[in-house]
Amino acid sequence: MHTMTVAESRALDARAVRELGMPSILLMENAARGVADAARGLGASWMILCGPGNNGGDGLAAARHLGRAARVHLLAAPEPSRCPDAALQLRILRNAGVPVHSEAPDPDRVPAGTVWIDALYGTGLVRPLDGAAARWVDLFNRAVGPKLCVDVPSGLHGDSGEALGGIACRGDVTVTFHAAKQGLLVATARPYVGRVIVAPLGIPL
C-alpha cells in the first residue's frame, strides 16, 4: 500500500489549492463523502464526535452527507480565523437546523448498532490529549458499536504510529485521504487503526 508522511499529504493539499485552483472547502467536501460512504457500509445510524479543527470539519460535513440519522457532538467550535472551512461546515449545519450538541454523548443512551465516528483530531496532533479531549476519546473507546476514525485515529501520531501518551481512539476502520499515512501501517498502530480505507480527494496525482 502506498504511504505518505503527514507533511507530504499537507503539501499535496496546498499544491492542489495553489496550482490547480481547487478550493480547500472542496477538498473537505470530498473527504466527507469518503467518510460517509465508508460509514454507510458499517450501519444505518451514526454518532459523530467532532473536534475544533479541520478533522472536525470533515466530520461536520460528513454528517450533512449522512442525513438525519447522524447525530453530531462537538467538543469545541472551530475558530473562523484558524479553521475557516470547518467553521463554514458548522454554520451550514446550523443554518439547516441540524442539532449540534456541545456536551459529550451518553453511550448508555445510544441505540445498539450505531456507528461511532471519531473526527476529533487529525494529523496535526503532536502532543498527548488531556482534559475533555482525553475523556471523549475514552468515551469513544468504551462505546459499543462499529467505530470509524477520520484520517488518523485521534491521539495517534500520523508518521510514527505512536499513541501519544498512550491515549488514542480505537477504530475498526480508518478512512484516510490521498494515501495511507505511514504511521497507520506500523505494527503498534494496528489496535487503533483497524482496516485502512484510502479515500481520494479528486486531486490528479
Image (tube, grey):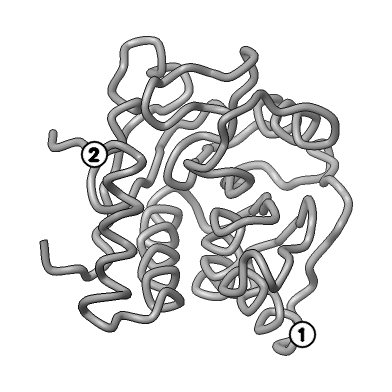
- Residue tagged by mark 2? 4
Percent across and percent down for residue 196 are 30, 36
Label 2 crowd bin: few (<14), some (14–19), many (20+), radius 10 Å: some
- Compared with residue 10, is residue 86 higher up or lower down, i.e. above or below? below
93 or 10: which is nearer to us?
10
Task: Using the image as rendered, state which of residue 142 and residue 81 is in the foreground.
Answer: 81
From the top left corner, tell me how far across and down residue 104 is, in percent: 84, 45
Q: Quadrant of residue 98?
A: bottom right
**Quadrant of the image containing the C terminus:** bottom left
Question: CA separation, marks 2 and 1?
Answer: 38 Å
Q: Return the residue found at the far front.
A: 18
At numbered mark 1, what does the secondary structure look like: helix, strand or loop? loop
Q: Which disc number belongs to residue 66? A: none
Q: Is residue 141 above or below residue 187?
A: below
User: x%, y% of residue 153?
Assistant: 51, 34
Q: Residue at x 88, y 51 (%)?
A: 103
**Which residue is the site of mark 1?**
97
Binning the other alpha carbons within 10 Å of mark 1 as few (below 14), some (14 to 19) or many (20 upward) gives few
Q: Amino acid at mark 1?
A: Gly
